[in-house]
Image: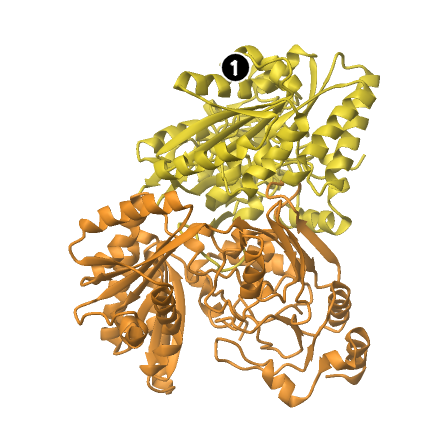
Chain colours: A yellow, B orange
Amino acid sequence: MNAIILQKITAIVGAEFCKTDKEELHCYSYDGSKQAFLPDAVVFPDSTAQVAALLKLANKHQLPVTARGAGSGMTGGALPVQGGLILACSRLNKILEIDAENQIAIVQPGVITGEFQQELQKYKLLYPPDPASLKFCTLGGNAAECAGGPSAIKYGVTKDSIIGLEVVLANGDILNTGGRTEKGVVGYDLTRLFIGSEGTLGVITKIITRLQPLPECRETFLIQSTSLQQATQLVARILQNNILPCTLEYMDKTAIHIVSDMLPTPPADDIQAMLILEIDGHKEHVQGQVKQLKTLLQQEPHCSLQQAASRREIRDIWQARRSISPAAYKLNPNKTSEDVVVPRTRIPELVHFCEALGKRRNLTILTFGHAGDGNIHVNIMTPEQSAQNIDTVTTAKTELFQEVLRLGGTLSGEHGVGNTKSAFIKMELDKTSIKIMQQLKTLFDPNAILNPGKIFPTAK
Amino acid sequence: MNAIILQKITAIVGAEFCKTDKEELHCYSYDGSKQAFLPDAVVFPDSTAQVAALLKLANKHQLPVTARGAGSGMTGGALPVQGGLILACSRLNKILEIDAENQIAIVQPGVITGEFQQELQKYKLLYPPDPASLKFCTLGGNAAECAGGPSAIKYGVTKDSIIGLEVVLANGDILNTGGRTEKGVVGYDLTRLFIGSEGTLGVITKIITRLQPLPECRETFLIQSTSLQQATQLVARILQNNILPCTLEYMDKTAIHIVSDMLPTPPADDIQAMLILEIDGHKEHVQGQVKQLKTLLQQEPHCSLQQAASRREIRDIWQARRSISPAAYKLNPNKTSEDVVVPRTRIPELVHFCEALGKRRNLTILTFGHAGDGNIHVNIMTPEQSAQNIDTVTTAKTELFQEVLRLGGTLSGEHGVGNTKSAFIKMELDKTSIKIMQQLKTLFDPNAILNPGKIFPTAK
């Protein structure tokens, strides 16, 4: 990187907070997508003013800037695919305000999601979004990617919990969107435009979240089924029966198999699928819903309902669920993770398709995920990274996406597009949509410095 | 209007569905804001293709186009302030699909909100947004203005119930946003950008809504208080006590007075404020919440809790609540309605301010509305439309807005900006926000044909 620019960057953040040594650059080169791209420098601003000064400078010199939270993203959102600056948010890590009476909070983007939730417990409040990485991922990254998690079925995803933002634009201007009230219709809703925009329209420097009262109690159930079709059909039926769980997770036989030793009791050999279901809320509410659930399950001959009897059992169930993704490597060393969504009633067709796809293409495919909102993680595992395998996986992925779209779904529910899915977005979005989105990108970032190479297919 | 253009319009929709006679134009010249502006023609397209052809034509000839639902808006959103075409949505009035299993529906913009809700009852489903005008307002108008209503406290406003749109852009291109699933992060969230944009960015031709299961039961309460401050303080306290009503409405003494004859029992003379509170959901849940409410109210010496005992009483309570706005004319013939929002805990300060403002400026001011989400309707009544009164009201309005912003609120929670509040938006939005919003407007509508004169202050 040009020495004069580097000097100017250092003048903004201080020498200590601008790193260019190889070791440091390597630490900021990768993310959950298992790709790596080296930045030219990593900066650690500690204020909105510093972020603004950095972007103004980068914009002038057309230097790519990629904001980074914890690097736990699954689609390359935090990777500097065109080099330039990594803007690490680790020093922007303060909870600025918890207004317990009005049930809102104001935080900086580097606050760790799980730590924010723990702090809120002191106030008996809940910030619901709970991506699997919540122990280390950050609220800024969650906002940029619009992260989800098991609780989305009841509480929505990240966008449903954010009511205002402070964003630094590419030219260094500071934009405030939304505010401290949930209602508000003065001007266009810019908050949602930034959430899920993967750092391509601006850098989020402050987040106003709405909060929920912490549920009084929660009950956890395992539903084991000897029929994959019946288990997946049950998902929509539960919701149609006016039961609204705060978690409704699904795992297929392969997923169960790789984590079976972590479950409270090992599942029988004929179990084809499993659901994890949780109900939270007031005691009376939970009791009523549990009663309804039990009645419903009595009518399902292939499914058995089992209530977690202790904290330990609950911990084991979640440990098993959260371990599926890493444990998949037991099967094969190379993984392609997708997080497609279909309308709930189409899940049986989708998982049936995935089974057949695995057989047809001779691939190990496991399916699991947030069945309650139709968001199924499809992991495709291959033994080696040969050119032929890569081709086969790409073909399988394309076939999967075609099927998902045929079923009325979307290619991504919570992982985003990044650079791993950008080549596929035109399968889902028509030309008019892509054109408008690219025009929006150009409006906000005319010099294309903000996280270049993401969302939109790059010209060859 | 130019005869050739008129001929082309007629060719698109048919002569029967393009009106230029004065009587017809008058019918489409006014709305709930009590202003009137004559259009040059009113067209009644019956398909997305016709809307697209009309916009393409209008764009070519720089003809203003204002989409109109039922004209029930409060801020002039549906008024052709610069003449041109009124695009009436009354023939785009079909419920295209109710997918009860996946709890979504697809509708055209001209469907009447209340009729949609009634249709959904057959499926035991609920589309929650319930603006006071729900018997005649339309889903398209609700989406364009992001309408709210009493149920917003629990179920959110219109934007929280819409997951996808079909929009015709100014150049006639058809854009699809979102989809049939609640989750989805492929590309930017354009759905929210259009909701609340008041027809200035495109014309909505299809709406995909999410639906809720119809609550099993609902209980209605009146809380009467001899202290305005205690009643308004109670609002935040109810929510802090983990009670989540589906309605939490407030009315001050003046509002009570003008509708007191409609209430089940006339309130005592010393009543200073009243809350209407409803709890819905499963039976067990409602019972539990009612118990908590009763316990809480025992600690409030100035407030008495009264449960509606019959359908008739509930009807009377709502009749009274919904009649406040029209009944206000009993006080004085001229009304200015505001729908400001403040964080819930600041409502006591806001209503105190309004009382003092009325005294200071010698104005009759009544306050009522959706206290649960801090959204207070402030009606300023004056005896005559003299220049002096108009000045006094403008001054009072400005002072009100200043106070609302000082309290951390917003100028509008659900009525929008239209042309009645456009002069005031710069009190709330900073220069960067307005600049970005105007750039967005220009991007979507370079010839400024879509509902010109709305949201942004017009140059003098």
- Nearer the observer, A200 or B139: B139
- Nearer the observer, B148 or B431: B148
- Nearer the observer, B71 or A232: A232
Q: Is residue A15 left or right of residue B4?
A: left
**Residue A267 in the image: above or below residue A243:** above
Amino acid, disc 1: Leu
Q: Is residue A395 left or right of residue B354?
A: right
Regarding residue A404, the answer to whether it shows in the image is: yes
What x and y, as percent, mark residue B367? Answer: 31, 68
Which quadrant would the N terminus of chain B be assigned to in this image? bottom right
What x and y, as percent, mark residue B157? Answer: 49, 55
**Residue B77 in the image: above or below residue A372:** below
**Residue B327 in the image: above or below residue B241:** below
Q: Residue furthest bottom?
A: B22
What x and y, as percent, mark residue A162? Answer: 47, 43
Regarding residue A190, the answer to whether it shows in the image is: no
What residue is shown at x 57% (from left), y 33% (from top)? Answer: A299
Quarter of the image holding residue A395?
top right
Q: Residues within 10 Å of mark 1 (few under 14, many from 20)?
A: some
**Residue B245 in the image: above or below residue A387:** below
What x and y, as percent, mark residue B337? Answer: 40, 72
Mark 1 highlights which residue?
A263
Q: Secondary structure at mark 1?
A: loop
What residue is shown at x 16% (from left), y 69% (from top)? Answer: B270
